[in-house]
Image (spheres, helix red, strand yellow):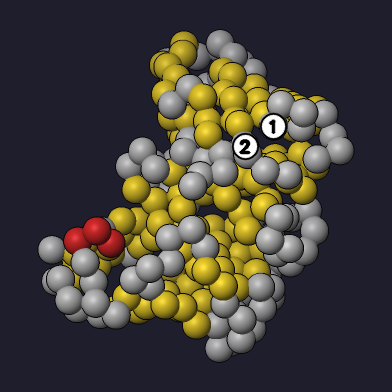
């Protein structure tokens, strides 16, 4: 049982390049989230999904797009990377409505130069 | 804007002492959770307290919730060097009708052996 797996773990991009971060969960969870973590800022919600085929904006969605074509996968895309998107990205999932904890991946460290 | 704000931002104590950290939030909540993050790792769920609960215990952890003051505290008793980590509170934002988990900025705890 792998839980929440993020791919890749590290990546360096040049400004203007695009990339996709993959989050996969094997717990049949309904809700999935993408956060970014910056020093002194805590975790900020980028986008989230409450089920297959649905997505919604979080606190800081600009510059990112997401897709949830399959229930187990939540993809975060950067179409044209900017240095301001240098951060550590975390994916999380939880079963659904109700009082449940979130399970986190190990993070993706992205540097945009 | 961040939902939760932890206080203090950093805390350094001796092994065996108790550590107390506080969290304030802004809107109505369904529950409040505390998470722990070891350096360079994902977040791990510690404890959840529902909005109709005032206190909860789990091992060496004690959490209180005061919904009238929109605040919560996490007490770690008899701290150990292995408790060194960052601690985050997270609230389930129900104002939008869906479950967005909003995290605070975290408290960095250092336990000295």
Q: Which mark is residue B70?
A: 1
- Does B101 sit left or right of A6 as displayed? right
Can you tell which quarter of the image residue A30 is in? bottom right
Q: Residue B41 carries which label?
A: none
The N terminus of chain A sits in image quarter:
bottom right
Which residue was labeled with disc 2? B25
Q: Residue B99 placed where, x, y %?
A: 69, 60
Task: Give the secondary structure at mark 2.
Answer: loop
Q: Is residue A27 visible?
A: no
Relative height, residue A5 to residue B86 (above, below): below
Relative height, residue A37 to residue A26 (above, below): above
Q: Residue A112 placed where, x, y %?
A: 19, 64
Farthest residue toward the right? B52
- Residue at 40 percent of width and 57 percent of height: A36
Q: What is the crowding at mark 1: few (fewer than 14 residues within 10 Å), some, or many (at least 20)? A: some
Real-space Cα distance between discs 1 and 2?
6 Å
The residue lying toward the viewer, choosing from A37 and A23, is A37
Ranked by sequence position, the earlier of labels 1 and 2 is 2
Task: Give the secondary structure at mark 1.
Answer: loop
The residue lying toward the viewer, choosing from B17 and A95, is A95
Q: Residue A11 placed where, x, y %?
A: 24, 67
- Does B54 sit left or right of B98 as displayed? right
Q: Are marks 1 and 2 in contact (CB under 8 Å)?
A: yes
Relative height, residue B69 to residue A20 (above, below): above
- Residue at 42 percent of width and 77 percent of height: A65
Can you tell which quarter of the image residue A22 is in? bottom left
- Residue at 80 percent of width and 40 percent of height: B51
Q: Residue A87 placed where, x, y %?
A: 31, 56
């Amino acid at each position: 049982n792998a839980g929440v797996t993020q791919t890749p773990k590290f990546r360096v991009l040049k400004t203007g390049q695009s990339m996709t971060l993959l989050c996969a969960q094997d717990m049949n969870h309904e809700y999935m989230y993408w956060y970014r973590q910056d020093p002194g800022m805590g975790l900020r919600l980028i986008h989230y999904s409450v089920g297959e085929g649905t997505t919604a904006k979080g606190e800081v969605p600009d510059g990112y797009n997401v897709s949830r074509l399959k229930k187990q996968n939540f993809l975060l895309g950067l179409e044209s990377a900017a240095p301001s998107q240098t951060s550590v990205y975390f994916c999380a999932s939880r079963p659904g409505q109700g009082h449940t904890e979130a399970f986190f991946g190990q993070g993706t460290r992205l540097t945009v130069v | 804007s961040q939902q939760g704000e932890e206080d203090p931002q950093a805390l350094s104590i001796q092994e065996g002492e108790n550590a107390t950290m506080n969290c304030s939030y802004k809107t109505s909540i369904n529950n409040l959770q505390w998470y722990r993050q070891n350096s360079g790792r994902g977040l791990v769920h510690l404890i959840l307290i529902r909005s109709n609960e005032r206190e909860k215990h789990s091992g060496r952890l004690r959490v209180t919730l005061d919904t009238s003051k929109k605040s919560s505290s996490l007490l770690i008793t008899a701290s150990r060097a292995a408790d060194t980590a960052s601690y985050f509170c997270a609230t389930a934002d129900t104002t939008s009708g869906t479950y967005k988990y909003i995290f605070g900025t975290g408290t960095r705890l250092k336990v000295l052996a």
